[in-house]
């Protein structure tokens, strides 16, 4: 009989591409991974891996096992959750959630507080992470749900094995120092900011790509990106103290920030959708967390 733990190792190896990568992700030594996969090959009665230079790749038999491993692991997760719920008399278990900063503060934290009252049997573990790093963790069962974002004109990849639900759609606003000459009007033309300094998230993020695209397409210029942080509150502070400009969504600006002006763009609206992403098969505990996140949003 095939061992589910070893099937998980095989699936992790397929996702990471190397034995060392799978070992780091799971907290094993590479030799322990190799030994367990050798046992899995004997259990399966077929060769599952083959060398490809310094790396290994799955054989056809290995790919078949990885495909079925996802179904088997889903079933085991659902069975464990159902047994825990019966024992507790209500949804129970651990639900691991990730969220980017502003959603963490404005959506996830209130949802966790509400669940502590309504579903005390659910232990919620939350970590701050951007979508780019959280999606692989969700697919590999290191997370159970993630709150992500998608800016207009910058669609996220679609994954057939994951379920996406919109939580809220918000406006993206121009943030500039309150002493800036253009702060006097209600709407600002992007073209008038061609000489400005800009603050944005790190390279490779959806926010940074959105901001670059807005400057190019709406303003007709290449932005002078001087300040980079994935912490939106740091970006607001850079606007306030250095005279930079930034494009930031409403979730960030809802707190009210002294020293800056928040304006709309004359060229039209930019938007961001905040969404919930889970695996297609959800336990009762994950369903309860999803409902609380929708309510908070």
Image (cartoon, helix red, strand yellow):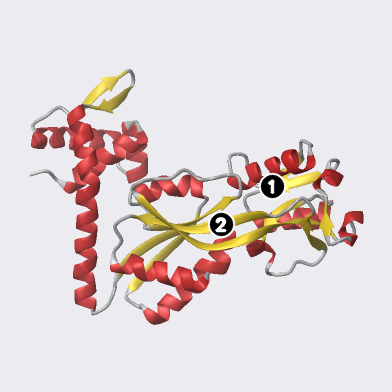
Q: Given the current orientation, which residue lies at the most extreme bottom position?
A: 117
Please, is residue 210 above or below residue 172 in the view? above
Q: Nearer the viewer, residue 152 or 202?
A: 152
- Picture coordinates of residue 236, whole percent (x, y): 73, 57
Q: In this view, does 288 lie to the left or right of 155?
A: left
Tell me which numbered mark, 2 or 1, is placed earlier along the sequence.
1
Q: Is residue 104 left or right of residue 82?
A: right
Q: Nearer the viewer, mark 2 or mark 1?
A: 2
Residue 263 appears in the rendering: yes
- Picture coordinates of residue 213, whole percent (x, y): 68, 41
**Which residue lies under the disc numbered 1?**
200
Q: In this view, does 60 lie to the left or right of 245?
A: left
Point 36% across, 46% down: residue? 160
- Picture coordinates of residue 235, whole percent (x, y): 71, 53
**Cα gap from disc 2 to disc 1, whole angstroms:** 18 Å
Using the rendered view, name the quadrant where residue 102 is placed: bottom right
Q: Which of 186 and 96 is in front in this view?
A: 186
- Picture coordinates of residue 220, whole percent (x, y): 79, 37
Mark 1 residue element: strand
Residue 48 appears in the rendering: no
Q: Nearer the viewer, residue 294 or 114?
A: 294
**Which residue lies under the disc numbered 2?**
273
Mark 2 residue element: strand
Point 19% across, 35% down: residue? 64
């Amino acid at each position: 009989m095939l061992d589910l733990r070893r099937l998980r190792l095989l699936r992790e190896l397929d996702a990471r591409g190397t034995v060392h990568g799978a070992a780091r992700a799971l907290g094993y030594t590479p030799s322990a991974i190799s030994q367990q996969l050798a046992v899995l090959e004997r259990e399966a009665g077929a060769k599952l891996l083959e060398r490809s230079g310094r790396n290994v790749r799955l054989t056809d038999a290995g790919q078949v096992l990885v495909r079925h491993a996802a179904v088997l692991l889903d079933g085991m997760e659902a069975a464990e959750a159902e047994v825990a719920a019966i024992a507790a008399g209500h949804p129970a278990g651990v639900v691991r959630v990730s969220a980017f900063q502003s959603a963490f503060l404005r959506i996830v934290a209130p949802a966790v507080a509400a669940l502590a009252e309504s579903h005390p049997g659910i232990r919620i573990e939350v970590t701050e992470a951007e979508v780019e790093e959280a999606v692989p963790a969700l697919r590999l069962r290191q997370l159970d749900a993630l709150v992500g974002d998608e800016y207009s004109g910058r669609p996220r990849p679609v994954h057939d094995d994951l379920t996406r639900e919109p939580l809220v759609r918000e406006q993206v606003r121009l943030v500039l120092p309150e002493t800036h000459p253009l702060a006097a009007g209600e709407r600002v033309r992007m073209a008038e900011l061609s000489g400005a300094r800009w603050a944005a998230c790190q390279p490779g993020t959806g926010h940074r790509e959105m901001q670059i695209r807005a400057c190019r397409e709406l303003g007709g210029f290449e932005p002078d990106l001087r300040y980079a942080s994935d912490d939106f509150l740091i970006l607001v502070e850079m606007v306030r103290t250095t005279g930079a400009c930034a494009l930031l969504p409403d979730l960030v600006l809802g707190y009210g920030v002294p020293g800056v002006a928040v304006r709309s763009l004359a060229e039209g609206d930019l938007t961001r959708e905040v969404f919930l992403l889970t695996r297609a098969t959800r336990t009762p505990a994950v369903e309860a967390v999803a409902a609380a996140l929708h309510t908070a949003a």
